[in-house]
Amino acid sequence: GQQLNQSPQSMFIQEGEDVSMNCTSSSIFNTWLWYKQDPGEGPVLLIALYKAGELTSNGRLTAQFGITRKDSFLNISASIPSDVGIYFCAELAVGAQKLVFGQGTRLTINP
Amino acid sequence: EAGVVQSPRYKIIEKKQPVAFWCNPISGHNTLYWYRQNLGQGPELLIRYENEEAVDDSQLPKDRFSAERLKGVDSTLKIQPAELGDSAVYLCASSHDRVVGAFFGQGTRLTVV
């Protein structure tokens, strides 16, 4: 079974608001990934994090690798309608090239 | 550059029937994955190939599921016979040693009735 817990499971916000979601793990991993999945599509990689404490941005998205190496958060600033979708965190098991996904955070934006 | 291509996009079959999914990974990607995604859940790994070798198939229900990756490129995933609980989206992904993360296809949505 999956070892990652994402929260919240769903979010309903107004366009222009900032968004924050997080992911916690029962184990220590060396790489955190954040993916976004649009309806009817496969997940698309947004951000990859490699070191504890690392803070990385990709446009309006910012993600951080927690100091304990057991958690990560993703922030979206000034949300727009195309941000709608499901956001997944994923861990890359060391030496295994195996991605383990969280259950996702579904983001809905009211215009 | 073309992405991961999967076919068909949708498939509806009756239970106990066989079904097969096809995947063409990104050119040069030596690692290929099949994931299953149930409604409201994240993808779960079924099998991972390194070139033509299945290196992780611990989550593949081997009594009814089979997969192959001939010549280390295209791959097929088969279910025989299908059960109602197999209804899900089946995602194929590929990656390269030097790139972190995997690139996903659009998936095949399977409905077993």
Image (cartoon, coloured by chain):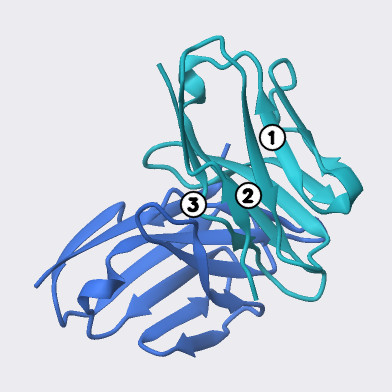
Q: Which residue is mark 2?
A: B92
Residue A12 coordinates in the image, percent (x, y): 16, 61
Position above or below: B93 against B11: below
- In the displayed orientation, state which residue is furthest to the top: B16
Q: How far apart are the alpha carbons under marks 2 and 3?
A: 18 Å
Locate residue B41: give its quadrant.
Answer: top left
- Which residue does the image show at 63% across and 70% down from the upper left? B2
Host chain of mark 2: B
Host chain of mark 3: A
Disc number for residue B77? 1
Using the rendered image, report if marks 1 and 2 lie on a common chain: yes
- Judged left or right of residue A82, residue B90 is right
Q: Which chain is blue?
A: A
The kind of residue on which mark 3 rests is Gly
The kind of residue on which mark 2 rests is Cys
Q: Secondary structure at mark 1?
A: strand
Position above or below: A66 against A5: below
Q: Secondary structure at mark 2?
A: strand
User: In the image shown, does A73 or B89 lie closer to the viewer?
Assistant: B89
Tell me the shade of chain B. cyan
- Which residue does the image show at 76% across and 67% down from the upper left? B27
Q: How far apart are the alpha carbons under marks 3 and 1?
A: 24 Å
Q: Is the residue under label 3 in contact with that under label 2 (CB below 8 Å)?
A: no
Note whether residue B52 is visible: no
Using the rendered image, report if marks 3 and 1 lie on a common chain: no
Position above or below: A97 against B34: below
The kind of residue on which mark 1 rests is Leu
Q: How far apart are the alpha carbons under marks 1 and 2?
A: 9 Å
Using the rendered image, report if marks 2 and 3 lie on a common chain: no
Residue A6 coordinates in the image, percent (x, y): 41, 55
Mark 3 against mark 1, which lies toward the viewer?
Answer: 1
Disc number for residue A102? 3
